[in-house]
Amino acid sequence: MDDSADPLIVLLPGGYADRHGVTHREVELAPLTGREEELLARSPGRDIAALVTMVLSRCMRRIGAISPVSEEVARHLLIADRQYLLLKLREATLGERVRATILCPWPDCGKKIMINFSVNDVPVTESEEKGPIYTIQLSPEVVASSAQGAESRDITFRLPNGGDQEALSPILAHNEARALNLLLQRCMQRLGSLQHPDEDAISRLSPLARMEIEQRMAAVAPKVELTMESECPECGREYAVPFDLQHFFFTELHTRQDLLYREVHYLAYHYHWSEREIMGMSRQRRRAYIEVLAAEIERLNHAV
């Protein structure tokens, strides 16, 4: 009775580079089942980046030739690839249409706004250069402004991944500037003659040097555009607000543990299926059976 729906096949906008330098992009993605819902229900307050890692590792049947997919692999996926997989996982689990309520960001309005869109309408930009390591030369103007001088002109970096999110989220909560500094330090492979420069070396970069490096990182990275732009129907003004995909997705998927167990009991009691079989179903399939069963019981009650 495990959910046997065909997996969703997707191509990562970036890709996962294995230890041999091979980049894998094709992913088989299965919908969440009751087992993942149970884990989410048991994980209140857990770091959301770690939850993304856990959920993706359990729902990716393979990535390229890699199967099974470990948490370590899911953790080292690029941030945009993780965002894209969450979008597609939402589609596989709950369908492609997203309906949500946000607040108008204008201070003198703040009214509730209903948004309705398809995950397939979210703009996704594939990276042209697959890396995983990128090398640039800072401009002469930037080098002249750097405390390290000409020796810091050659820069080698990688792109941020889920492991960076997990490591830095506790710091980000209370010191955003230091978290951003540490993120750049974690991604920097070489700064001039320095291999894996420390936080102090990153701190000594001039603002112009940082800007040039960050612009280059943004240029080569894949992108999932998660800023919602529209017009408030209440005040008539345009707005642009970031759509917190991770928080929204896990809020949608959250099922109280007692409700999940009641659903399992309901199906087990009437169909005599095992807990293992029912927990292996996706939420949509589980609740489809519950609706059919409830309708049949209602029909039988009225026939008496």
Image (tube, rainbow, N blue to C red):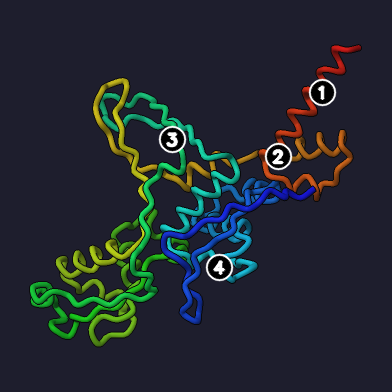
- Residue 183: image quadrant is bottom left
| SS category of the residue bearing label 2 | helix
Q: Earlier in the sequence, mark 2 or mark 3?
A: 3
Label 1: how many residues lie within 10 Å, few (<14), some (14-19) or many (20+)?
Answer: few
- Image coordinates of residue 241 in percent, x first then y, are 32, 39
Is tag 2's residue or tag 1's residue first in the polypeptide sequence? 2
Which label sits in the foreground, 4 or 3? 4
Q: Nearer the viewer, residue 234 or 203?
A: 234
Counting residues from the N terminus, which is met first, the one under dot 1 or under dot 3? Answer: 3
Q: Which residue is mark 3?
A: 117
Q: Nearer the viewer, residue 231 or 166?
A: 231
Residue flagged by tag 1: what amino acid is it?
Glu
Distance (Cα) linking label 2 and label 3: 23 Å
- The residue that mark 1 highlights is 296
Measure how far apart labels 4 and 2 are at the Cα level.
Answer: 28 Å
Q: Which residue is mark 2?
A: 285
Asked if the residues shown at circle 1 and circle 4 are in contact, with their CB atoms under 8 angstroms apart, the answer is: no
Q: Earlier in the sequence, mark 4 or mark 3?
A: 4
x 43%, y 35%: residue: 117
Q: Is residue 58 above or below residue 269?
A: below
For the residue marked with disc 2, what is the amino acid?
A: Arg
